[in-house]
Amino acid sequence: MKIAVSIGDINGIGIEILIRSHKELSKLCEPYYFVHKKLLNKALKLLDLRLENANLVSFSKNSKQEFKFLKKEKKLNIFSFSANLSLDVDYDFELKPGEIDKKSGAYAFLSFEAANHFVRQNYANALVTLSIHKKAWEEAGIKFKGHTDALRSFYGKNAIMMLGCKELFVGLFTEHIPLKEVSQRIEFKALAEFLRDFYLETRFKKIGVLGFNPHAGDYGVIGGEEEKIITKAIIFTNAYLTFLQSDLKSQKNFLKLIKTDEKESFNELLHNENSQKELLKTFTQKEFYLPYPLVADTAFTKASLKECNHFVAMYHDLGLAPLKALYFEKSVNVSLNLPIIRTSVDHGTAFDKAYKKNKINTKSYKEAVKFALYLAKLRQKSKFKSEN
């Protein structure tokens, strides 16, 4: 499989991580690095490293999209790719290791934007992004706060943010919003749609939804209204996913019963309580999701994680604080619910470590590539019909 890799902020540790991981990851896939050879050579000189048997993609702004092989030079395959990028590409600048710089910020964004176009046009199976510096993007005039924000704008879809590794994954129902607003967002229709999409994108065998209140509401003693909504959304989603997995005859009979077609089935069920009752009555639910909200303060114990290690959290820190305490070095960031597959390292540019020839941890990047390959293979063999 082919993977497009955007290099992130070249003043950070991303380029060193890429170089040091290349030989190992090339055994798993065929990576294409969106970086100009002139800039790469500057980084290699500072790091005193070599990169061989690699594919480099020189990208440029052009209304006509085109991908072609240019030449083989010193054991490197040089390609060119033109696309309708947001800015003209400037790659003739000096590196400033460990510094925020608008030129490196613009280049990081354009490397990402070009790689995204590359994957969207099926030249590669997935996109892997290295870390960018949000302030460098801002100084370059980039309006987006990060990769996920940009991807939502590119595709006009609500990208789902998931973080983790094979030992523990957490999907976020809400992300960077004040806690006082989270309760208002926990609404049946929105949560049911999220849970449907999260499962269809990951196919995890058992998923737990973390409660919102302490002790998951403690049977209504500590709030608990949110837990009622969460429970309703879980039960509905389990039934709907069971419907999707049923045989065609059962599906057709049910759609005839609720007087709708396959394309509109989810919206009909989401908005019509009578149809919801028929769904729950007709299909014996499989447990795609555990049928009740989990108590978050015990969900991450060793014993609990042996039973369930895939979660949905209602808000950012509820799920990510334990994840980063347990698996920070190998955790990855994944954007779900998009036309393309995108994974990323789950760490920053680490300017304090850049180009100092210290030991750099490459686990997160390697996990990001491996999980991108997993998702790509999953999409290829999926038997579910996508309604996206």
Image: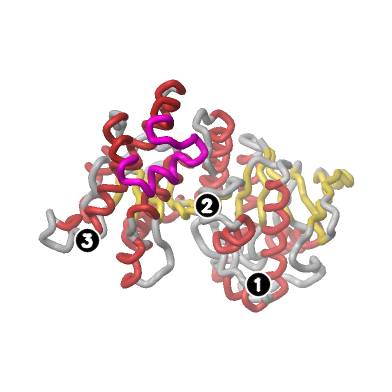
Query: Picture coordinates of residue 4 (x, y %)?
Result: 68, 47
Residue pushed farthest right? Answer: 71
Can residue 78 be seen in the rendering of this structure?
Answer: no
Mark 3, residue position: 213
Residue at x 50%, y 32% (from the top left corner): 384
Q: Residue 153 appears in which quarter of the rendering? A: bottom right
- For the residues labelled 2 and 1, the Cα–Cα distance comes to 20 Å
Can residue 103 be seen in the rendering of this structure?
Answer: yes
Say if 114 sits above or below 208 in the image.
below
Residue at x 22%, y 53% (from the top left corner): 228
Residue pushed farthest bottom? Answer: 139
Q: In which quarter of the image is the C terminus?
A: top right
Number of other residues with Cα within 10 Å of mark 3, as a class: few under 14, some 14 to 19, many 20 or more: some
Mark 2, residue position: 335
In the rendered image, residue 208 lying in the magenta stretch gets the answer: no
Q: What residue type is labelled 1?
A: Ile
Residue at x 41%, y 25% (from the top left corner): 253
Residue nearest the viewer, comparing 232 with 4: 232
Say if 86 sits above or below 339 in the image.
below
Residue nearest the viewer, comparing 381 with 109: 381
Query: Which region is colored magenta?
Result: 256-275
Residue nearest the viewer, comparing 249 with 304: 249
Query: Picture coordinates of residue 301 (x, y %)?
Result: 24, 48
N-terminal label among 1 and 3: 1
Q: In this view, does 188 lie to the left or right of 266?
A: left
Mark 1, residue position: 142
**Do the residues bearing badges 2 and 3 touch, measured as CB atoms within 8 Å?**
no
